[in-house]
Amino acid sequence: MSSTAARRFLQDAAVKSADLMHREVIRRGMDSYDAAHLKGRARIKDWEAARQKCQEIKREAINHLDRYLLQFEEKVVARGGHVFWAANSEEACAYVKNLATRFNVRTVVKSKSMVTEEIHLGPALEKAGIKVWETDFGEFIVQLREEGPYHIVTPAMHLLRGQIATLFQEKLGQKIESDDPAYLMAVARSVLRQAFFSAEMGISGANFLVADAGVIAISTNEGNGRLCTSVPRIHVAVTGIEKVIPRLEDLAVLWPVLATSGTGQGITTYSTLIGGPRRPGEADGPEEFHVVLVDNGRSQLLADPEQREVLHCIRCGACLNICPVFRHVGGHTYGTTYPGPIGSVLTPHLNGIKEFNHLSYASSLCGACTSVCPVKIDLHHHLLQNRRNATEAGATKSSERLMFRAWRHAMLRPRMYALGGWLMRKSLRVVYGLGLQGTVLDPMRKWNRYRSPVPLPSESFRARWRKDRAAS
Amino acid sequence: MQRNVSLFVPCFVDQLLPEVAVDTVKVLRRIGYDVEYPEDQTCCSQPAFNTGYWDEARPCAERFVRVFKHADVVVSPSGSCVTMVRNFYPELLARSSVRDDAIAVASRTFELSEFLVKVAAVTQVGATFPHAVTYHASCHGLRELKLRDEPLQLLRQVKNLKLVEMNRSEECCGFGGTFAIKFADISAAMGNSKAENAAATGAEFVTAIDPSCLLHIQGILGKRQTRMRAIHLASILAQDGQTSKSPQQERP
């Protein structure tokens, strides 16, 4: 565990997990989510059946991804839209950038999209001299702070309203008179309203790509998504290839399940379907409609039958919200686009096993994530498989490999195991007796830093059993 | 009715918490079972398996299967180690020569509270424990073995025991095996949250069906110098009101 990302993760985790203020802010946010989520689930007659159905839909889609994506493309193209297949971030960014150049785009408004974060589209456009506005309220805030989203659904959940007021005061060049949420939202709205009407291009993500209808489905709560996709001349939807679903009717279960898992809502405030540019005689809508389908490592995951189902993810954030690791270290500590359990499973696949192997291990394997996943991804077992794959690929430390070889040797020999256990207890008692607890001579120092020492009984159970049996 | 059980004592219980195994034997005998302890057992292989060393884990798991192959029923006071055998052996040993035996052993291996409530159909084991106790739902028992109510059913039948519910009782205590060492900061932060929630109940004891959680929780409580003690469910059930020995002398 010595990659740069791993070292940074450990450092940030140490800081954040000791930051009680941070923990309190997250706890409050998560508590209100928990309550809403429970209430939302109760609204669905048979939650387990709904999960099952969603899993089946996504499984069908992923197992026939080729067919459904082509079907989607055909429909979109027939309506005058364009579909671009991007193998990686570079191709995706270059396509959008070229499009912007071709149409003389100076300003872009974006609605929330994690895939654009993944491919770093915003910075790529800014580098080309294009002004990019994040228009989701949370994304708008973290963009002003020049940081990535903290959470995939609620990007600014780590901030208190006072911090947001101060930020607006500093960055928006206007006097901020209150930290009342409605007021702060009104400030952002007035700034963004101008951006919406000056932007030549709107960029959105897509929650689903509906194959049989050839439309993208977007779930939002603030209305910014509709403005981004209908006001500017050009609309570009950037999304991952795994977002495709077979049928329009599948949304009947996917929409409420996504909303329930994401925020506890029955359905998001805006549920939008878009299938092409403005048609003759229509009053509004963009002149150009482009869909960028991003692969970026996904088809590699598709090729792995054991872990393919990770592509079922609908990015609801439920696994982050319940994860005790996420709750204690926070979203930014992961140093990845996708934090939390799904991020820990996915990132070693998308960004490299060598650099991100530590995330597969940064879990107690408690399985809370798996228990809430609305598409029933076996998240914590995928972490186990990641670990096995990493070990087989030689991505673990040689000292650890040696240790487990020695461990195996002892565990196959009961006497050696018993002797080893006795020696360990005996030597620890000596070390602690000499007052060396916590020093380099204490093999349990990492444990003892935060916990009192483990009990060191003079006799093991097997010794006691043998004695008792001899006595009787 | 089957009256013999083979005891599977997890390696760290054998070495660090022998009292938990002793108490398990006591409870099983009290309700009329003969307990045998196959002495050549070692470890179920979970530490290697969870760390990704499946090639190292496999021979160890195969060995476990051979040791317990002829047992009618295997009982263990650890939800986590039973999870390894029951849920993961079939996968780990999918291509092993002992695969069929492994699946058979897996289906006959039970966590203690599961065995008592579901197999032996006993919730009243004649225990007395005049203390306030809060229950931590260990992850593997809860989510892998689906044991939500079984331990509570047993606790509710203990004479003079006052059960108090803690906030977030189903959230992980942060142990996670090598996680507790590799990511000690995170693990301990989780442990402290757990300890705070447990201590806030005002109970004297926190109990669970997994000695590994209790080892961690006790370690955190000890460091915080909290008066509350961690105690295994088996050790509560073993208290028959006859002995004068305080359970506080043994941890957890």
Image (spheres, rainbow, N blue to C red):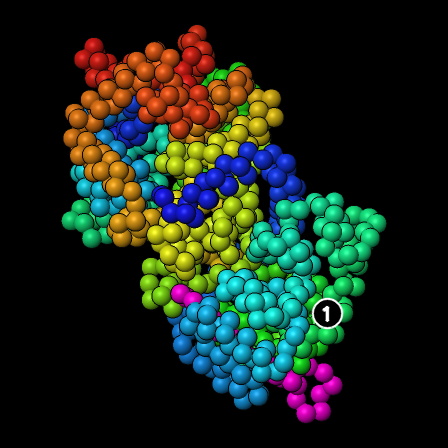
Residue at left 58%, top 51%? Answer: A150
Q: Quadrant of the N terminus of chain A?
A: top left
The image shows residue A120 at horizontal and vertical percentages of: 52, 63
Q: Of the residues shown, which amino acid type is indicated by label 1? A: Ala
Residue at the (44%, 7%) spot, across then down: B244
- Mark 1 surroundings: few (<14), some (14-19) or many (≥20) residues within 10 A: many
Answer whether residue A286 is magenta in the image.
yes
Residue occupied by mark 1: A195
**B64 with respect to B166 (left or right):** left
Instruction: In this rendered view, identify the residue nearer to me: B175 or A192.
Output: A192
Residue A316 % position (x, y): 56, 58
Q: Position of residue B149 (x, y in %)?
A: 49, 37
Task: Look at the picture and state if A404 lies above or below A43.
Answer: above
Q: Quadrant of residue A102?
A: bottom right
- A192 in the magenta segment: no
Residue drawn where x is 53% and y is 59% of the image: A315
Left or right relative to B57: residue B231: right
Quadrant of the image occupied by residue A401: top left
**Which residues make up the magenta segment?**
A276-298
